[in-house]
Amino acid sequence: MAIDLSGLQAYQAASRAAQGGGAASNPVQSPGDMFGNMVSDAITDTTATLAHAEQMTAAGATGDAALVDVVTAVSAAEISLETVIAVRDEVVRAYQEILRMPI
């Protein structure tokens, strides 16, 4: 079962373009570098999403945030974390498959 990462790559490209860094400012990278950068960006985004969910939860507990905002932030964090876990599982599965290959 293959994971389609084209949506994540399109999102990252749009984010870089919005921040002023387009393809012209990015030198040609090897596929390994691109994958590493993609994983690093996904982990950074997930960490930020989890931190935002924690802040919203604390704000909701004190009454400073609406319940719908808290639920939305926690749901986004859950989806982001599940995505990272799914990618991790696929990487582990691929590594195990490589170990089973005859030399």
Image (cartoon, rainbow, N blue to C red):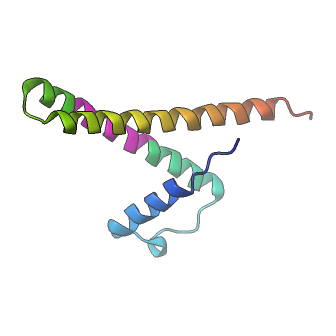
How many badges with numbers are in the image? 0
Residue 42 picture location, percent across and down = 46, 45
Quadrant in which the C terminus is drawn: top right
Q: Quadrant of residue 47?
A: top left
Residue 7 picture location, percent across and down = 51, 56
Q: Is residue 34 left or right of residue 82?
A: right
User: What residue lies at 65% left-to-right and 36% top-to-bottom?
Assistant: 91
What is the residue that sits farthest to the top in this orientation? 61
Q: Which residues are magenta?
A: 43-55
* As drawn, 102 above or below 16: above
Q: Nearer the viewer, residue 53 or 28?
A: 53
Q: Nearer the viewer, residue 29 or 19?
A: 19
Q: Is residue 26 left or right of residue 64?
A: right
User: What residue lies at 92% left-to-right and 33% top-to-bottom?
Assistant: 102
Quadrant in which the N terminus is drawn: top right
What is the residue that sits farthest to the front in this orientation? 68
